[in-house]
Each structure stands twice: as structure tokens, then as C-alpha cells.
Image (tube, rainbow, N blue to C red):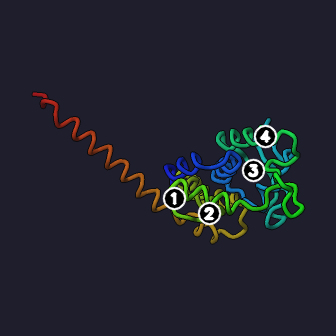
């Protein structure tokens, strides 16, 4: 997901989904295994951490640092659900769960409204990995932040890196062209 797509998606998303999108894209959490069942007691705002107590494997449990954007989204979600122990409480306690267990319909509807082709919500983990890798974070650390035991899995998550590079080059070309047009009207210095 590009930054411009994320902006469009967030504009069309209900507030709880907007908060989930930001947290997943900023922290790489698994939507249904780690984020949706998260209790507010797992959030350590003072130390800017989230404790992952139930991950895919026991080795992947532990503390995950929050970025400022993730912190802001988590704080917004606290305000959305002040009376629940869960960060994303279920409005109807579907399937007996006290937290949201399915975002598929809201996700699909939001993508359609935003004019973004469908992709699974889980792929926001790819966005997280790609952005960290493109930002210069060592692949080893990105793999750890994804809580993956196998570094080979990281390659799949960072597959969009080339698209991000292309987007950055296109932006630089547009800026250079705009600069060239503006400077072409000025008189040369003699």
C-alpha cells in the first residue's frame, strides 16, 4: 500500500478501522491474532510499548515499540471504546467473542469507496516491512519486528520495495520537471 493509497483508505474508513490500519502499517501486528484481541492492559503508553502476549508461536511473544503514529491511533481507539477492557471491542459480541473478529466486510467496503483495488488486510504487514526496509532498517531487525522465526519469510513481506522505489523516482522526476519549467522562464545570469 502506498502512502497516497493509505490516505485515501483512511479517509473512507470507519474510525475503528482507520485506527487498526495505522497500527498494523506502523507496527506490523497480525490483525486477527495480535491486534483485534488486544487488551488495553497490554498497552504501555509510558514506555511506548505494546506487549504481544499471544502470537503465532511462543517465541514471538514480547514487547513491541510503538511509533508516534501508532501511539496516536491506539490513543484514539482508547477513546472509541472507553468502557471495554479490549482495544477493539465487538459491538455485538459476535461468536461469543468480546472483541472484533472479522473486518473483511468493512475492509472491502472501505477499499471500494477509496477506489483502491482489493487486497487482504493482512498485507499491511507487507507495507510495514517494506517501509522499514526502504527506510534503512536492517532486514534482520525487520524480521524480528515482524516476529518471524524464518528470515526467508521477510523477502515475501518486502516484495513491494521496488514499487516504493519507483514511486520515489517518479516523485523526484516530477519535482525536477517542475523545477526545470520554473527555472526556464528566468533570464540566465551573465
Residue where numbered disc 3 is placed: 64
Residue where numbered disc 1 is placed: 116
Front label number (3 vs 1): 1
Percent of width and height locating residue 74: 73, 43
| First in residue order: circle 2 vs circle 4 | 4
How far apart are the alpha carbons under marks 3 and 2? 19 Å
Front label number (3 vs 2): 2
How far apart are the alpha carbons under marks 2 and 4? 25 Å
How far apart are the alpha carbons under marks 2 and 1? 14 Å
- Which residue corresponds to the image point at 64% horizontal and 61% vertical from the top-left? 121
| First in residue order: circle 3 vs circle 4 | 3
Residue where numbered disc 2 is placed: 123
Question: Is label 1 in a helix, a strand or a loop?
Answer: loop
How far apart are the alpha carbons under marks 3 and 4? 18 Å
How far apart are the alpha carbons under marks 4 and 1? 28 Å
| First in residue order: circle 3 vs circle 2 | 3
Q: Which mark is residue 96?
A: none
At label 4, counting other C-alpha atoms closer than 10 Å, the crowd grade (few under 14, some 14-19, many 20 or more) is some
Front label number (3 vs 4): 4
Residue where numbered disc 4 is placed: 78
- Between 39 and 49, which is closer to the camera in this rendering? 39
Question: Is label 4 in a helix, a strand or a loop?
Answer: helix
| First in residue order: circle 2 vs circle 1 | 1
- Which residue corresponds to the image point at 84% horizontal and 45% vertical from the top-left? 40
How far apart are the alpha carbons under marks 3 and 1? 29 Å
- Is residue 177 shown left or right of residue 116? left
Amino acid at each position: 500500500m502506498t502512502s497516497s493509497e493509505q490516505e485515501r483508505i483512511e479517509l473512507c474508513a470507519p474510525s475503528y478501522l482507520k485506527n487498526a490500519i495505522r497500527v498494523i502499517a506502523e507496527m506490523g501486528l497480525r490483525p486477527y491474532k495480535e491486534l483485534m484481541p488486544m487488551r488495553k492492559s497490554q498497552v504501555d503508553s509510558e514506555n511506548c510499548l505494546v506487549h504481544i502476549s499471544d502470537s503465532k508461536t511462543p517465541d514471538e511473544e514480547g514487547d513491541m515499540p510503538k511509533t508516534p503514529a501508532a501511539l496516536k491511533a491506539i490513543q484514539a481507539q482508547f477513546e472509541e471504546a472507553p468502557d471495554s477492557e479490549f482495544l477493539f471491542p465487538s459491538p455485538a459480541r459476535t461468536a461469543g467473542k468480546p472483541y472484533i473478529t472479522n473486518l473483511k466486510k468493512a475492509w472491502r467496503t472501505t477499499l471500494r469507496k477509496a477506489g483502491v483495488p482489493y487486497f487482504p488486510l493482512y498485507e499491511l504487514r507487507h507495507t510495514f516491512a517494506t517501509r522499514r526496509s526502504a527506510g534503512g532498517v536492517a532486514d534482520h531487525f525487520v524480521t524480528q519486528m515482524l516476529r518471524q522465526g524464518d528470515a526467508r519469510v521477510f523477502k515475501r513481506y518486502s516484495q513491494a520495495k521496488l514499487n516504493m522505489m519507483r514511486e520515489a523516482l517518479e516523485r523526484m522526476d516530477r519535482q525536477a520537471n517542475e523545477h526545470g519549467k520554473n527555472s526556464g522562464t528566468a533570464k540566465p545570469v551573465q
